[in-house]
Image: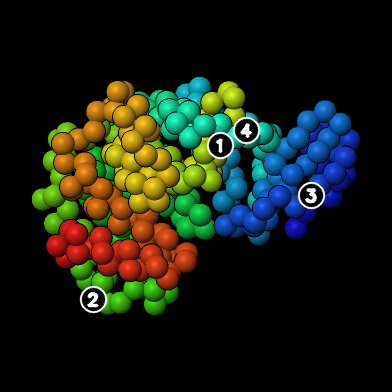
Amino acid sequence: MIPSNELLQNKLDTQILSIAFYTKGQIGDIYKVETSNNTYILKTSEPSDRLKIEASMLNDIYKYDIAVPQVYDVSEIDLLLEYIPTKKIAKCTQEIEAAKILSQLHSVSNDARMYGYYYDTTIGPFTQKNEQTQYNWGLFLSQMRILPMAKICYDKNAITRDMLTRIEILCRDIYKRIDMTTITPSLLHGDLWSGNILFNINGATLIDPALYFGDREMDLAYIMMLDTFGDTFFNAYAEVHPLSEDFYEVKVPLYQIYPLLVHVALYGGGYVSQLEQTLKRLKL
């Protein structure tokens, strides 16, 4: 439901020239709002706390001087954001700018050295529970990310009981697969596909985060899963944060399980086959 022009004018304290449908989001329609002196993005949803959570995540990233849209107003049904104009730039330039902003985000940690976040966050239409924030990365990844999403997929009949059992075995033994002592909590975007990073002559801007603290290579494995960026990105990123020795062989398939489950829950189809292949790669 689009807020009335009068309501928007009160929020912006300026005349609204137009409100036009922009695109469809995971939780509601998105509109482009034109005023006499500016352009905004208006995200909508059914009444919930999801847009307020998104606003909080964007504001949290903004505190670290990392480019995200400015939040102007938020309620249970709408979120008014700065409109970020995009410009077509060379692919290699995109990858270098993406490496800059992501390495900057991943340089943020927390004094408590905890995994998770200070409140529950979201990824698409799903809640990411963080109330049991933990100091053990493997335990957090398995109990707060992989298993809850696997159960959502199973309840949707998107995966079989056998596949759920294999994922449970993976989570039980996850501590055997990675050296937890080499991992430091980093602030993750959490949903970094090509549509959630915008480019123009000023560089890159992050949108639609699914924020939490985790192993920074979670974001990298997701990037590889969707083939978002290539060698130029990884070479530039590694100049700031060198990749783990076991990144490609161990962490990539392991860390792709959670985003694959999210995609299975949303879309099913080919992502189930991709999940199956990844489990086999993990010898499950």
**Circle 3 SS class:** strand
Q: Are marks 2 and 3 in contact (CB under 8 Å)?
A: no
Asked if labels 4 and 1 touch by Cβ distance under 8 angstroms, the answer is no
- Disc on the earlier residue, 4 or 2: 4
> Residue 20: which disc?
3
Q: Quadrant of residue 16?
A: top right
Q: Is residue 207 above or below residue 161?
A: above
Q: Residue 278: which quarter of the image?
A: bottom left
**CA separation in Å, label 4 and label 2:** 46 Å
Q: Please, is residue 265 above or below residue 207 in the view?
A: below
Q: Nearer the viewer, residue 95 or 90?
A: 90
Q: Is residue 63 above or below residue 212?
A: above
Q: Residues within 10 Å of mark 2 (few under 14, many from 20)?
A: few
Pick whichever of labels 3 and 1 is earlier in the sequence. Answer: 3
Left or right of 62 on screen, residue 115: left
In the displayed structure image, the side of residue 204 where residue 36 appears, left or right: right
Residue 150 vertical placement versus 93 (above, below): below
Q: Is the residue under label 2 in contact with that under label 4 (CB below 8 Å)?
A: no
Q: Which residue is mark 4?
A: 87
Q: Check disc 3 and give the amino acid type.
A: Ala
State the residue position of label 1: 198
Question: Looking at numbered disc 2 in the image, what kind of residue is underneath it?
Answer: Asp
Q: How much space separates mark 1 and mark 4, taking CA atoms?
A: 9 Å
Residue 93 appears in the rendering:
yes
Q: Secondary structure at mark 2?
A: helix
Query: Label 3 crowding class (10 Å Cα cut-off): few <14, some 14-19, many 20+?
Result: few
The type of residue carrying mark 1 is Leu
Amino acid at the residue labelled 4: Lys
Per the image, the residue denoted by label 2 is: 162
